[in-house]
Image (cartoon, rainbow, N blue to C red):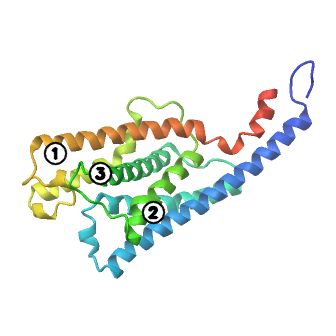
Amino acid sequence: MNKQSGKLSDREIDEFGRQFSKRYIVKKRVNAILCFVIALCGTSAVLYSRFIFNNPLIDRLRYMTFWGTIFTSVISLISGIVCLMEAAKETEVTYRHVYFLRLSAATAELVIFSVVMFGLTPLVPDRPDVSSYPGIMMHLVIPIATVFSFLLNDAPLGKPRVEEPLKGTLLLAVYAVVMITVFRSGILPDEKAPYSFLDFENTSLLYRAACFAGVFGVGYLVSWLLMRLNMKLSWIWFFDIDRLKKKG
């Protein structure tokens, strides 16, 4: 480094570039592996539920957990392939809409995880499955892995605007619209409601409104928090070589 000017020398700049490139490739390859593991866990959990537990898939799709697992598995598989492409080209090749699909998956999984944890308390009548293989994968492993994958890999979009975290609740909104339509239209009877707040026959309007407001309120806050944390944590792979940059 030129001590008088405080600028990095050409040699130091080249070294910084080489170290950054190496770390970037490692970051993308590690995330590709994590994404493929998530996709494998999701696929195996769905197949286990279908063929070992003999649960009809159409019946399991009443649950947000299954929607989240299938959606997250597909997005993770695509993301893993993209990460390998990014590692090969040493550049980001994803777009804003892909970022928001990843955000939607991470938001849905973190909400699922939060609802499961809340469901284990005596405050609500729902009792989530956290003991079987599908339950462990869908309620614990996949949510945690998906959140870490998003936070530590995806290129941030900058400080989120007020409306942007709403895009992270996309899957929650689609699920809510479909399930409300299914139960209110009588396609499925109320006793098939997977969650108490979808049981329109046996719960009060106030309870259902509070649950929906809570889920979407938490979903929005989770989405916003994930975007903010992604800004801070996505560069953790480069924390040590970044000091060389700051010295200049």
Q: Quadrant of the C terminus?
A: top right
Q: Residues within 10 Å of mark 2 (few under 14, many from 20)?
A: many
Q: Nearer the viewer, residue 106 or 71?
A: 106
Q: CA distance from mark 2 to mark 3?
A: 28 Å
Residue depicted at 68% across the width and 55% down the height:
87
Q: Nearer the viewer, residue 32 or 204?
A: 204
Residue depicted at 60% across the width and 56% down the height:
31
Residue 2 in view, yes or no: yes
Q: Quadrant of the N terminus?
A: top right
* Secondary structure state at the residue bearing disc 3: loop
Q: Which one is closest to the eye, mark 2 or mark 1? A: 1
- x, y percentage for residue 62? 24, 63
Q: CA distance from mark 3 to mark 1?
A: 18 Å
- x, y percentage for residue 16? 82, 40
Three-letter amino acid code at disc 2? Ser
Residue beneath disc 3: 121
Q: Who comes first in sequence, dot 2 or dot 1?
A: 2
Q: Which one is closest to the eye, mark 2 or mark 3? A: 3
Q: Who comes first in sequence, dot 2 or dot 3?
A: 2
